[in-house]
Amino acid sequence: MTNILELRNVTKQFGGLVAVNDVTTDIEEGSIVGLIGPNGAGKTTLFNMIANYFHPTSGTIHYKGNDITNVKVDKMAKLGIARTFQVTRPFGDMSIIDNIMVGGYLGTNNTKDVRKKAEEIYEYVAMTCNPLQVASEVTTVDRKKLEVGRALATAPDLLLLDEVMAGCNPQEKLELVECARKIRESGVTIIIIEHDIKTIMSCSDKIIMLDRGSKLVEGLPQEVGNDPRAISAYLGEDYVHVEG
């Protein structure tokens, strides 16, 4: 398969702190890749470098064969990369549909077309609230789906989901997993940070585990789940027992 994203020796330092250390990996087009690891492992920093909120101290990032290492963040959506945030950031005084429409103006100024697309996305991500409801008043899971919907409105080829399932109950997490799978089936590649190990293992084609800024393990979910390094650093013996 074709790689949509290639990271080579990516490092990020903040003063004397090395947040991400010499990470090299490939992300295959049309896959869901889970990014896991303990708090402080460097997951969100790596996300921020892919999305160019931060530039690497050293190393390179290529997207669709083009070097995007130092591209400005406001250019990323036009390139086809979108992201959500761990803490949802809707325009609270705007309706659900109006929130989704914001991203749609990236490709056109035709409000009728943008609204039609926003309504389609609202249905696509299976929100349960009224589409005209004010965003600040909806449930946690609908706020999460709204984050995904706003990102999808920019028509990305690569979608970065930062703990999109945090704060959701098991049924809501299943809804979000199904949403992610549907997005992947439409041709969008997904990289997702998630702390719920069972959930991330169930929906990912590949798992990358970071520990103290470095890539510790990479492979199929079952490979990572049985890797002694992953068990010791993060998963724990209970995970192996449950999965076994």
Image (tube, rainbow, N blue to C red):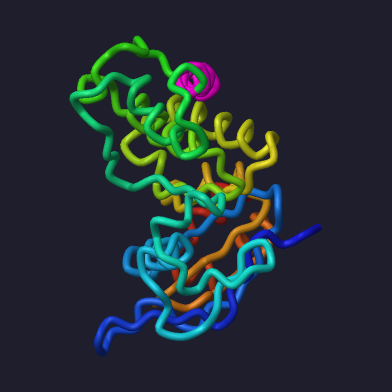
Location of residue 26 with respect to 148 vertically, above or below: below
Which quadrant would residue 183 be assigned to in this image? top right
Location of residue 130 with respect to 234 vertically, above or below: above
Front residue of this view, candidates 237 and 201: 201
Q: Residue at x 51, y 53 (%)?
A: 239
In magenta segment, residue 31: no
Instruction: Name the magenta segment's main secondary structure.
Output: helix
- Residue 185 visible in the shown view: yes
Whether residue 92 sits left or right of residue 64 in the image: it is: left
Front residue of this view, candidates 78 and 218: 78
- Residue 241 visible in the shown view: no
- Provide residue 106's location: percent of width, then percent of height: 46, 39
- Provide residue 44's location: percent of width, then percent of height: 38, 61
* Residue sticking out furthest to the right: 1
- Provide residue 176's location: percent of width, then percent of height: 49, 32
Q: Residue at x 61, y 43 (%)?
A: 202
In magenta segment, residue 125: yes
* Magenta-highlighted residues: 114-126
Q: Residue at x 39, y 69 (%)?
A: 42
* Residue sticking out furthest to the bottom: 16
Front residue of this view, candidates 10 and 203: 10
| Quadrant for the N terminus in the image | bottom right
